[in-house]
Amino acid sequence: MNSEKRMCQNCKSEFVIEPEDFDFYTKMQVPPPTFCPDCRLQRRLAQRMERTLHRRKCGAPGHSEEIISVYPPDKQLCVYDKDFWWSDEWDPLDYGREYDFSKPFFQQFRELLETVPLAALFDSKSTNSYYCNMTLEHKNCYLVSAGWSNEDSMYSNRVSNCKNTLDSSVCYKIEFGYENVNCRASNRLFFSRNSEGCANSYFLYDCVNCSDCIACTGLRNKNYHIFNQRYSKEDYKQKVAELDLASRKGLNQVREKFETLCLRAIHRYANIYRCENVIGDNVEDSKNCYYCFDLAGNAENVKYSNWGTYGAKDSYDAGPGCGGKSEMIYEGMGTGTGDANCAFFTVVYGSNSVRYAFNCHGSQNLFGCVSVRGKQYCILNKQYSKEEYEVLVPKIIEHMKTMPYSDKKGRTYGYGEFFPAEISPFAYNDTMAQEYFPLTKERAEAEGYPWRVSEDRVYQATKQAGDLPDSIALTPDTIMNEVVACAHDGACAHACTTAFKIVTGELQFYRQFNLPVPQLCPNCRHHARLAQRNPMKLWERSCQCAGMESTAQATTNYSYKNGTAHFHGTGQCPNKFQTPYAPERPEIVYCEQCYQAEVV
């Protein structure tokens, strides 16, 4: 079979379906997609709520207490406290219904979703962890989202196997970390990104196996460096004291110089480590992956997928959240460990042979189910025999083809399409879609996406951000009694909460590491870290290495001088690549060969 060009029914752009893609769709017994890869990702992200939490009443019988939930109180849904939801006190099959061949499938699914009890938070096997969502096996955590197996950590997103880590994003195996982005296997690392195996350091970019370094880029196996300059141990200690990193003023001065140093460093075309035949960004120990982002390891034969843990195989459009040791996943968001042959779902763990499901676990042979656990051969939460199920499912698939669902924009959704964004139980601006495909309220509503108007904040700040002490040494314990006004004061586009509080474990961490308390609320801090990440999108570019000296975009007026000879001599490097650095960005971007020549 040859490659085919298709037009996306959403954005009207052209995309290509390759012969191996057709082979995968045939294996999964699904038709080829009608949305392009970017629009498919946006559609899945519109079903993923990670960080926006609300207070509402528990809907469980005999339980009217207030709970924390991903669903706002005005949503006409039945929401149970997560512990009660996981209990055996109720049966999701009590809400089962016959399939109605007079209605489109997605309409019936939405009606079921509005009836079956939903878990207030997507969390399991966690202890003493509060306000955590899309999380698994946490201990003593607070406001951690999209994480796995973390301990004593706070205010972090997409972290795993971390301990005593605060305000970090996309980090693995970090202990005692603060304000890090895309960092791995490090200890006592602060304000750093894209670094691995580092310790006792501040403000590192693209550093590996470094210790006792401050504001450095592109270092390997170094210590006692400041602004990439080597010091003796004694001089290093003296210089660190002069930098006054214990004060907010000192940190901001170092941060400003560090950002300039980062901009003028060479940038690897993509963060791909120990991989074979991989195109994407932030992928390690994987092979045969295309257009993939943030795969933590051992992924194989995966395309258009993102945010994966160890061992995803033979999958397309898996993620956000592509679980370990799962295979044959297609258009699934929130894949747990051990899934197989699952498609078109939101949060499914330990299951196989599932089509169209929402928060189902430990099950097999499900079609159109919500909140089902430990069951098999169910359709719309109704139990069938194996023989009945195998007769009815093909009829439903054919019905989805002949009576597709049409949304407000006229986009059609038959069998093989993920859930329409307009039937998501979450408002578009509360989901991950708003972070990676931001829309205005007017544009979102024009597209038919649900939108939530934020309620008025009624916090009475007792301490302004500008009045916070410059260092933790000057900060009394009574700071925990204060309502601190966020420095953005709601004037940003970051879902600013306008005010926040400092909690006990947080203050202890700042005291332990001599860090000043933050001036921004957790949401604004999260978006500041998000701005340090590359987008989940690729552009084709040429290596900017020009021999002895490489020049950045004309508007930036700086250049980089190579420290060694490269394979192409004094001429322009001929290599091309796909990169998350858009052509108009100011960084100097090198291919793998030129990058390795400079940093190793």
Image: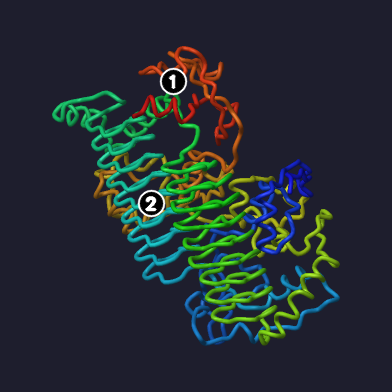
Which residue is at 36% across, 28% downward? Answer: 599
User: Could you say which quadrant of the image residue 163 lies in?
Assistant: bottom left
Residue ID for mark 2: 172
Q: Quadrant of the C terminus?
A: top left
Q: Nearer the viewer, mark 1 or mark 2?
A: 1
Res. 145 visible in picture? no
Residue lying farthest front?
A: 1
Picture residue at 48% right of the left edge, 26% below the top: 590
**Helix, strand or loop status at disc 2:** strand
Q: Residues within 10 Å of mark 1 (few under 14, many from 20)?
A: few
Amino acid bearing label 1: Phe
Residue 584 vs 280, above or below: the answer is: above
Q: Measured along the vertical axis of the image, is residue 135 above or below residue 94?
A: above
Can you identify the residue that label 1 sits on?
A: 567
Check the image and report above or below for 580 versus 256.
below
Q: Nearer the viewer, residue 19 or 124?
A: 19
Residue 471, quarter of picture? top left
* Residue 50 image point, x, y percent: 53, 58
Give residue 143's position: percent from left, percent from top. 44, 59
Q: Position of residue 371 (x, y in %)?
A: 59, 76
C-alpha span from label 1 to label 2: 34 Å
- Tag 2: residue type? Tyr
**Mark 2 or mark 1, which is nearer the start of the sequence?**
2
Q: Position of residue 410 (x, y in %)?
A: 84, 55
Q: Could you say whether the residue bearing mark 1 is in a helix, strand or loop?
A: loop
